[in-house]
Image: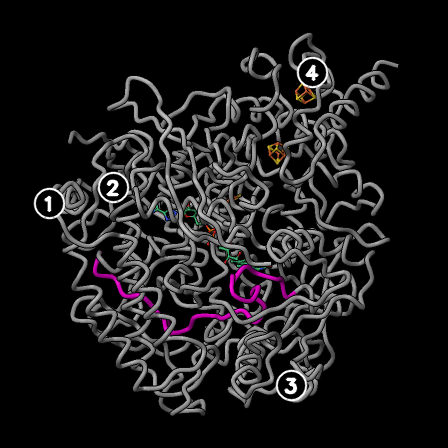
Amino acid sequence: MSLIRRRFDALIIGAGGGGLRASLQLSRAEANVAVVSKVFPTRSHTVAAQGGVNAALANVLPDNWHWHMFDTVKGSDYLGDQDAIEYMCRVAPKLVYELEHYGVPFSRLDNGKIYQRAFGGQSQNFGEKQAARTCAAADRTGHAMLHALYQQNIRAKTHFFDEYFATDLIKNEEGAVLGAIVVSIQTGEAMLIEARTTLLATGGAGQIYRTNSNALINTGDGLGMVLRAGIPLQDMEFIQFHPTGIAGIGMLITEGCRGEGGYLVNGDGERFMERYAPNAKDLASRDVVSRSIYLEVKEGRGCGPNKDYVLLKLDHLGADTIMKRLPGIRQSCLTFLGIDPIETPIPVYPTAHYCMGGIPTNRKGEVVMPVKDTPEEPVPGLYAAGECACVSVHGGNRLGGNSLLDIIVFGRAAANEMIEHMKENRYRLPMNEASVEKAMDRLHRWDRKGEGETVDGLKEDLKKAMEDYCGVYRTQELLDKGVEEIGKIRDRLPNVYINDFSRTFNTARIEALELENLVEVAMCTVVSAAARQESRGAHSRVDFPKREDQQWMKHSLYFSEGDRMDYKPVRTKPLTVDSFPPKERVY
Amino acid sequence: MMSTTDWTFNIYRFNPETDQKPTIKSYELQGVDSEMMLLDALLAIKKQDPTLGFRKSCREGVCGSDGMNVDGVNRLSCVTRLSELNNPVEIRPLPGLPVIRDLIIDMEQFYKQYRAVKPYLIGAEPEPEVERLQTPAQRDLLDGLYECILCGCCSTACPSFWWNPDKFLGPAALLQASRFIEDSRDEATHVRLDQLDDAYKLFRCHTIMSCVQVCPKQLNPTRAIGRIKERMVQNKL
Ligand SMILES: Cc1cc2nc3c(=O)[nH]c(=O)nc-3n(C[C@H](O)[C@H](O)[C@H](O)COP(=O)(O)OP(=O)(O)OC[C@H]3O[C@@H](n4cnc5c(N)ncnc54)[C@H](O)[C@@H]3O)c2cc1C
Ligand code: SF4
Ligand code: SF4
Ligand code: FES
């Protein structure tokens, strides 16, 4: 296979909100930037985000960024890095206004300002009354943001490679990243994109679970690429299970429903969140609500013939509110459940939703890893932003509305840092052909003909194993078994074959490449989870029910070579304000 | 209401590397729940035959990847129940644009027309420190316009687009044009209207309404086109 070669200043892999916010910054700075995405940009998963984006605009209730910071640190169960969190919460208003200027059709208040709704884990005055911090475009905020960002990129003449699949990073001997190998899905041709700076913005990996709220394309490709490049992944045991997935399907029902006044009831018709979180009730943090639903069902208080879900009640909100503020949710209920939430409560159950962990970066978006005695040494030329990155602003548990914020804040920050880096490093490093060859060999692996297992078969086993051994509640026994089972699945990979060798739009090959990434990410998740012997945020250990700050207030780092774990301290020192010391987390 | 039946799917197949011309291949799924979504059925078929090509992503009707022609109607497979369809189901790619492979079409012409309407907000400069104000009534004008997911179901159902895909902008692009014309924050309204005032770009629409019937987001491009025409008249006065 001949290899096409192209050169850019900046390569962005991923055209979700994170990638597009970065590319816009770079294009406007007149950098020569290429954006690669395996789907047409507006089909990226950001399009599915519903509820909104957080910023302390104080349009509805009093608010300020410092309260937002407190809530985020507390929500993270004190695993978030406070310098990055301060940075994010401080710039949030500016960047949301900027989104408005880009054309995002936010819902409006009577005074013409951006509409804001209440979301879980938000408070005024450091833990007091509920705040309303989530800026929303009805319940289609992600769609509105992604389209506006794509549109402004069209205006800025960003160069897009749509339907190109990135397979591997290219590195030199010193560890600097020189670009990536990408494959045109339409023609099957491989291309080497040489770039002075490369940004990974490949999104999440919800597809490692059977029941999830994610798009089928969320297969953690960027995470796999990073692991294969010898770079660790951080805090991967922290997987957020969103409390309200449509029962049995996993599709998301936004927290905005509860923000608008909806609440959960069990089989006895009891509003059970009052028991688990007397103050915040249904708007407690996601990890708390998910565990509560799980326990209600486990203790026999579920709803329905099999008592295996709870109900989300919206019928008391009135048709007007639902039509105006939650039209997309209503549509989904009609389509997937054949019920109208104006009249009928929605059956819900926790669904795998979001990856708090990811590629370790600092608050400038540089990818960092331990080198000798330095815990956080930048990997030259490599950046990451969005759900695939771990800055970490979400720590052990992400607050609703903070991811759409994370992607724009750190997409922009990474782009700014890339611009700086290119000013200081004017010359292109020579290509490393050995690394290119290695990547090409991996790609050619799928040209091998033979009889063995199918991609789908292995994928199903993987998702099932993750659900069985690494779900909402975890124990050492389950997790050890999970490590063993996922290990076996990983060992079966070389025996997987595809039977389609055509070049044109070969989706079988793409799914095989995605499977390799899913396996790497699943392994990383379960190994990291088995190692952490405490409960924190979304990582709930039945056998270690307490948070252990002495021993475990630290970030996990997983290296795929030898499935090795390492740790680094949490950055508890903010940029300008006082640190929020760990406290017991009650809602 | 669970009813299980055997379903047959007659699917358009074409691989340019091996096929002279397209063929229809039949697939069977036995004992499936008729309330299953068509996308899930296609995924099950793909397990039998991994060479079957179709696009997919969100599974919930928001990304616009999986437009296809089902029993003669353009639809998104992920929000179409089998029980709404004939058995056997006839599945073809969206009509009127070149087929790359199987159910996957080349949408470049469609995207080109989208880009042609300058689908981005052109606001007043310099930008204010905070948000631009917009009343709820002004914002309501965007409802029914901004939700488009660029699935292409409408434009590929439009006879005028089939005949003049390079000159007539088509319902999706015109809907986008309207989305920015109606936006109180946009400063380029006159330029936009002048640009559309052309025998082909806009006026090839003969209000046949096929676009409205197929839009999976219940949007109404015909009404948007009508609104643009009204604005044009106002603009000239
Ligand atoms: C249903 C749902 C609702 C949500 N609602 C909210 C909300 O209300 N508020 C909130 O803050 N957060 C919400 N979230 C979370 C938030 O939407 C996501 O975390 C965020 O959008 C991720 O953005 P991203 O840019 O990092 O990645 P994505 O939008 O997932 O984009 C990833 C990009 O990478 C590309 N890509 C991936 N792999 C490859 C590859 N190998 N080669 C080439 N390209 C590749 C994809 O094509 C895509 O363009 C929600 C999430 C879900 C699932
Ligand atoms: S109404 Fe106009 S745009 Fe819609 S299908 Fe008919 S001709 Fe096409
Ligand atoms: S108007 Fe409707 S049918 Fe047409 S592209 Fe948009 S969403 Fe699809
Ligand atoms: S898969 Fe996204 S619209 Fe159907």
Q: In the rendered image of this protein, does residue B18 appear above or below residue A235? A: above
Q: Give the range drawn in magenta.
A: A229-255
> Which residue is identified by label 2?
A181
Residue A250, numbered circle:
none
Whole-Å distance between the Cαs marked 1 and 4?
Answer: 57 Å
> Which residue is identified by label 1?
A434
Assess mark 1: CB under 8 A from ligand 1? no
Q: How many labels does the image show?
A: 4
Q: In the rendered image of this protein, does residue B193 appear above or below residue A88? A: above
Whole-Å distance between the Cαs marked 2 and 3?
Answer: 49 Å
- Mark closest to the chain's N terminus, 2 or 3: 2
Viewer-nearest of discs 1 and 4: 4
Q: Do labels 1 and 3 share a chain?
A: yes
Label 2 marks a residue whose chain is: A
Label 1 marks a residue whose chain is: A
User: Residue at coordinates 49% horizontally, 80% vertically from top-left?
Assistant: A78
Quadrant of the rendered image holding ligand 3 = top right
> Which residue is identified by label 4?
B205
Q: Where is residue A28 in the image (x, y as percent from the top left)?
A: 51, 37
Q: Where is residue A574 in the image (x, y as percent from the top left)?
A: 51, 74
Q: Where is residue A223 in the image (x, y as percent from the top left)?
A: 32, 58
Viewer-nearest of discs 1 and 3: 3
Dot 2: element = strand
